[in-house]
Amino acid sequence: MIDAGFGWEIADADILHHGLNLADVGHVLDLHYRKIISDDVAGQLLGVLADMHWTDPADFPYDPEFGEAYNSRERYFAARIGDAAGWLHAGRPRREAARVAFRIVLRRLIAELLASAAGFASKTCNMAVKHRETFMADQTYLQQAQPSTLGHYLLGFVPSALRDAERLKVALAQVNQSPGGAGCVNGSRLLQDRNYISDLLGFEGVIEHTRDAMWQVDTFVDALSTGVSLISNQSKLAEDLEIWSSQEFNYVDLAGPFTRSSVLMPQKRNPYALTILRGGNGVLVGRLTGLLAVVKTPSARSDNLIFAYGEVPRALSYARKLSDLAAGVVETLAVNEGRLWTMLESGFSQATDLAEHIMLECGIDYRTAYRIVGDVVKTASKNGQRGVDIDPAAISTSAQRVAGLNLSLDANKLADALNPRNIVASRSSAGGAAPSVVTAMAERYGEEATILASHAARELARFDDAEHKLWERAEGVRAAKRR
């Protein structure tokens, strides 16, 4: 039990330490407010908790032989102040203390991840505007698809990040609800008004149903799954950039601090940050899977959360670090604009627009135009030509061969239809790749990101203020006891 059970729980004591201190202070103040404990007892308890507040978790005698972290704390309190420590149990099981502490820890981590998601979105918007006229052949399945811009490509990763940020905002509000006063399953006769401790600890409200307050897990699944979704989106970008930064593509280069040199091969610098993002995403998927595996217990079982106390905070903390890394990669990315244009111009990504041009100019159905263009591209490729080199004669020949049609196209109109810049400019509908559309989208997305970042900052400041006021009130009770 000590090695396999208590040892596991105690390993998370450093994560819960700060939250447990706050949970205990709030409970003492709640008991004192209701006159359940005397000024003297409150002063003694708050005194030892104040010492705990300034004690590094690594220096506190958490010992798996005594069970979970709460038990080590109880023994320490009893050794310091004797029977007065026993009042800390009044109206509250040890699991409730851990539940409160868990939410105190998580709310800050979620707010920080929300801020990071907004930061990634904002920095990606800035790069998108910068490269709104950096023309490239967009790709699907690593094959040239249609002419576009790097700005439009990059901006495609922003809506997902913003949606995840919105989900984190909702998750934050759900996590920042107080289970205080829930007792074990049906509440406590000693703590009739559960709002008092909720307000003390800076929660937005009280989780109404006491059983739900103690044993719910969906809130934590939601927060972690959203974190995984955020990093999965960034991992997709990392995979693309890793390919594009290769010598074979040479589209982009990572800034020096985001790469690592080979210790053997002098010419080689690896895009190591992208490896971390991709691998880190896999780690987070594993942690989410692990959480889902342990929370499928029957109701009111401790094992559905004791394995989450450390894993969920660690996962959310790591997700924030990965998101910050992704933002740094994007913000400092060097783009080989000449190479992007050369590869665009040398290919046939305008084939779709060519088929539509033939359809509209010649009045034939799209499928027939598609077959003609397919033959044109095949022939041009064999002859070493590019998409921009296709002329009316080549189209006429293919039309006769494929469909038995005699087609005649205006050379100037055809050249305009094959021009990648014109093609991109024509994508002026909502969400399109036209530079003006990309700029407008980036501005709107950037405003959303700013609002979300401000919300995260306000929440973090509110948590700081609540903790400051909690300790001020605790000091006030201690001072009154000394008088």
Image (cartoon, rainbow, N blue to C red):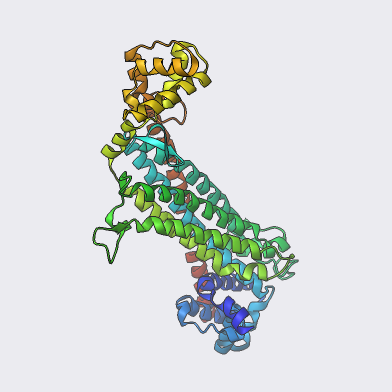
Q: Nearer the viewer, residue 442 or 151?
A: 151
Residue 173 x/y as whole percent:
57, 53
Task: Report if residue 360 is visible in the image.
Answer: yes
* Residue located at (31% from left, 23% from top): 389
Q: Position of residue 123 (x, y in %)?
A: 37, 46
313 vs 434, left or right, is right
* Residue beneath the point at 44% across and 40% down: 156
Where does the image place residue 105, in percent across and percent down from the top left?
53, 65
The answer to whether 193 is drawn above or below residue 335 in the figure is below
Q: Image height check: is 341 above or below 121?
A: above
Location of the N terminus (image quadrant)? bottom right
Is 85 or 459 nearer to us in this picture?
A: 459
97 w.r.t. 281: above or below: below
480 on left or right of 410 = right
Q: Quadrant of residue 7?
A: bottom right
Q: Residue at x 40, y 58 (%)?
A: 275
Tally of numbered discs:
0
Residue at the outermost left position? 266
352 left or right of 206?
Answer: left
Q: Measured along the vertical axis of the image, is residue 331 above or below residue 110? A: above
